[in-house]
Amino acid sequence: MKEKGPITGEQIADLLELTRATLRPDLAILTMSGILEARPRVGYYYNGRSGNTLVARAISKLRVKDIKSLPVVARETVSVYDAVVTMFTEDVGTLSVVDGDGYLSGVVSRKDLLKIAISGGDVHKMPVGMVMTRMPNIITVTPDDTVYLAAKRLITHQIDALPVVRTFVQPNGQERLEVVGRLTKTNITRFFVELANDEL
């Protein structure tokens, strides 16, 4: 293609000593993946882009709201023990912690809870608000952020999940965050598996 393009399907078939029908699926895949371009009455030609074009396009279009999971939250006042129970019954590795008004105030991970359990603290009496990571040290995403941005934040900050939030500005001008979902490494992995299945 690099040397002879643009070239028709018939010409390619003749050069390779194959039938056009045999080549059709291969040409379709190469065109869909963005490696080849096809123009009517002109033929196929190599466009110089990599084979990752299809994946790159899918990722650039995909938004957090398209693959996020339901939020799993705990109140600041619940005990560390109850937070552990919630984490295991919901099968999650991170909980979003909300204040009395239901707005995001922190995040607690398995690692945070394990530290308290190992240190000998009374997990039945200690509120989760004492062990969580507090605002503004929480990394979040919005429903309209790209999945690429979310994945980059997960990797950069070495965390397993991000609260998906909407911002509310109160009458006094203070910004509060409502938790509307969670975005995890599992969400992103599932998307890649589904994308591959669609293309196989």
Image (cartoon, rainbow, N blue to C red):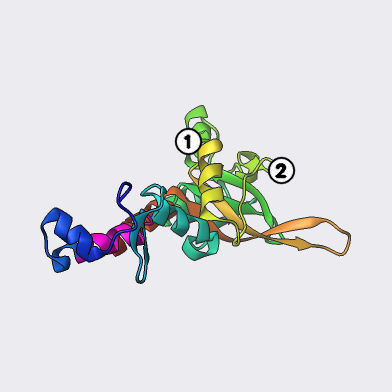
Compared with residue 174, is residue 40 higher up or lower down, i.e. above or below? below
The image shows residue 21 at horizontal and vertical percentages of 15, 68
Decide which of 101, 171 is in the foreground and name it: 171
Which residue lies at the image location 58% right of the left edge and 53% below the top edge? 163
Residue type pointed to by label 2: Pro
- Label ID, residue 114: 1
Residue 197 visible in the displayed image: no
- Asked which secondary structure carries label 2, the reply is loop
Question: What is the quadrant of residue 16 in the picture?
Answer: bottom left
Compared with residue 57, is residue 133 higher up or lower down, i.e. above or below? above
Q: Earlier in the sequence, mark 1 or mark 2?
A: 1
- Seen as rendered, the residue at the extreme bottom is 40
Query: Is residue 121 one of those drawn in magenta?
Result: no
Residue 52 visible in the displayed image: yes
Residue type pointed to by label 1: Leu
Left or right for 71, reference 176: left
Quadrant where the C terminus sits is bottom left
Marks 1 & 2, CB-CB < 8 Å contact? no
- Asked which secondary structure carries label 1, the reply is helix
Query: Is residue 25 one of those drawn in magenta?
Result: yes
Left or right for 112, reference 197: right
Which residue lies at the image location 46% right of the left edge and 57% below the top edge? 57
